[in-house]
Each structure stands twice: as structure tokens, then as C-alpha cells.
Image: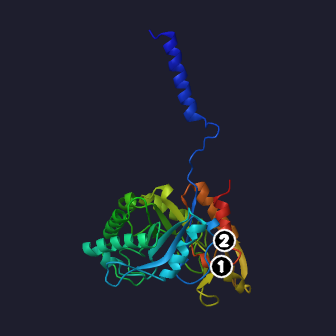
Amino acid sequence: MVKPALYSFFRLFVLGFVFLFTYPLKGYVQTVQEPIIVSYVTANTKPLPDVSLITHINYAFGLVNEAFDGVDVSNEERLKEVVKLKIKSPNLKVLLSIGGWGAGRFSEMAADDSFRTSFAKDCKRIVDEFALDGVDIDWEYPSSAEAGISAGVDDVANFTLLMRDIRKEIGNAKLLTLATIADAKYVNFVDINPYIDFVNVMMYDVSKPSLHHSALRRSVLSGRVTAEEAVEAHLKAGVPLNKLVLGVPFYGRGDKKQTSDYVLFRDIDKFSNFEERWDDIAKVPYLVDSKGELVLTFENVKSIGIKGEYIRKRGLLGGMYWEFFADNDKLDLSKALYNSLYRK
């Protein structure tokens, strides 16, 4: 039989334990992952982003060198200028993004043990030399020659080895991320998951007029894949929800006959001779000509805000955009993404 005094003590202990883990104590702050915002900043000499509106910068680009055993950094002085933003915002993370559309030599480098090891070591050198917070790998895409680069049948497996080797060299305290095609092809996410911190989903350029290039949901005008479908594709491929960062474009794509092929958001107003419409299913704007045909697919403050709300409500890690300079001088898109993600 349990003695009364011992029973009382045991009962108080259990009640206290339940209370502690059920109700937050006064002054106790629970740790909650704030959404991240990744801004791509190019090597060109242009204005720098407002660091109060972002958490990460991916500096674009570094390249696999011609010897296949290291990294060439575009405009090193510009990179140093970007890193200095950390003085103003100590929590800002700056990564070197290596690759980009049409950037080759990945296949040759990753296929050779010696080249791959040397490349990984050079990533470590650059992280230390420029006081970076990590590396973003933007190989577009392993096993695909669509961008006019070399490709091999073993690229996907070699990409996993590359991420493993880079992680080994830079250590666990630094970030290792990657940019991926919207429909989650060309990467074995299950195998690379132990080595990566998060995945930047390039949810843009999936189609061109007469279809949207960055629709949130499926409508008759949506392109090859929508943002919702891209998220589901990555989840199905093995990316954890809390490692998914949804990319959005700060630019539009035109039909090249009546507009430019690539139109920065800051230049959208130049096409005032077209009618602007809103796709209430896809949740994106677009321009049409006198025949009602879609000639320019793009984003605006409303669509970016809706995408930010989707990111937040769906529980993704955050949002990413290409690229900072495409925003207007008032930073309307940058503010729209920030405000929608950090709405309380």
C-alpha cells in the first residue's frame, strides 16, 4: 500500500509535469522557426537588397572551373560588398550559388573522385576566404543536356556524392542548399536529404505565353506545372516539408513577338498598350493583346502576397526569389513577400 504522504508527493509531481509541458510559463518563449526569405543577388554592379526584408542571399554565380577541380567566383569584389551587409544585419546568411542555367562542367567534375574531392575542398576554401555561411548548388540539371551542357547517365548518383563531399568539407555549421526544377526531376532527394539544409524550388519558367510561367494553382492557362503541384512533387520525391523553399519570379516572360522575352517587374508598366487581366484560379496576373491572347505572364504585389500566404499556411520553410534587381525602386514585391510571410 502506498503511504498517504508518498502518494501526495507523487500526485503533485505528475500534475506539475503535465502543467509544465501543457501550458507555457509566464515569460517562457517557445522556439518557433520563422520563415526564411532567400534573395538571389547577381554579380553585376547594381543596388543591394534591403536586408530588413530578407534572411538569406544567394550570390550568383560561382562556376565549376575549366580544370574541373575548383570554383571560379564571378566579380569577387561584388561578393565582398554583399558579405559586408552582415555588418548591418548580423543574422543575414550569405551563400555562394554555384551554377545557373547553361553553366556546365558539373558532369565531368562530379564523375571523377579526384575532381569532386578537390571541388568540395575549394568550396570550403571559398566559404572561409569570403566569410560565407554556405554554398548553394544550382546544377541545371543532373543527367539533362537541355541547357546545352554536358550530361551523363550517372549524373544523378554523382550529384549525391557531390553533396556528400561538400558537406564533409564545409562541416555541419555551414549551409548546403540546392536549386531544383519545379517538377522535382533529376535529383535523388531521399539520398541527399542527410546532407542538405533546404531546397529552393524554381517555380518559374515552366512555360511561356500563351500559358502562365508561375501559376499557383491549375487553370486552363497554367503551364506545365503549378506551385501547388511543385510542392507535392517534391514532397512525394522525399523532401521534408520543413526543407522546402518556394521560388517566385520577380520578372515576366513574354511572347517575343509583341513583348520582350524576359521582362523585369520594374519594367512591366512599359507595356501599357496591353490589357491586364487576373486569373482568379491560378492567382496570377497577365497581359493580353487586342485579340485577348496572353502575351506576357508575370507576378505583381497581389500574386506574390497570395504565394506568401500559401507558403505560410502550407508550412513550408520559406520563399525565394530570382532576382532582387528585378523589383522596382519601391521594392513592392520584396515587401509583399515579407509582409505575407511575417503576418501575425
| Quadrant assignment, res 63 | bottom left
* Amino acid of disc 1: Phe
The quadrant holding residue 263 is bottom right
| Pick the front one: 271 or 42 | 42
Label 2: element kind: helix
Name the residue: 33% across, 63% down.
Answer: 168
Circle 1 packing at 10 Å, graded few (<14), some (14-19), many (20+), is: many
The image shows residue 103 at horizontal and vertical percentages of 42, 81
Image-based side of 121 in relation to 9, left or right: left
Real-space Cα separation, disc 1 to disc 2, in angstroms:
8 Å
* Residue 260, horizontal then vertical, whole percent: 61, 88
Instruction: Say which quarter of the image contains residue 327.
Output: bottom right
Q: Residue 83, position in %: x, y?
A: 53, 72
Q: What residue appears at the point 47 percent right and 66 percent down from the top-left corner?
A: 133
Residue on which the image places disc 2: 333
Q: Nearer the viewer, residue 155 or 9?
A: 9
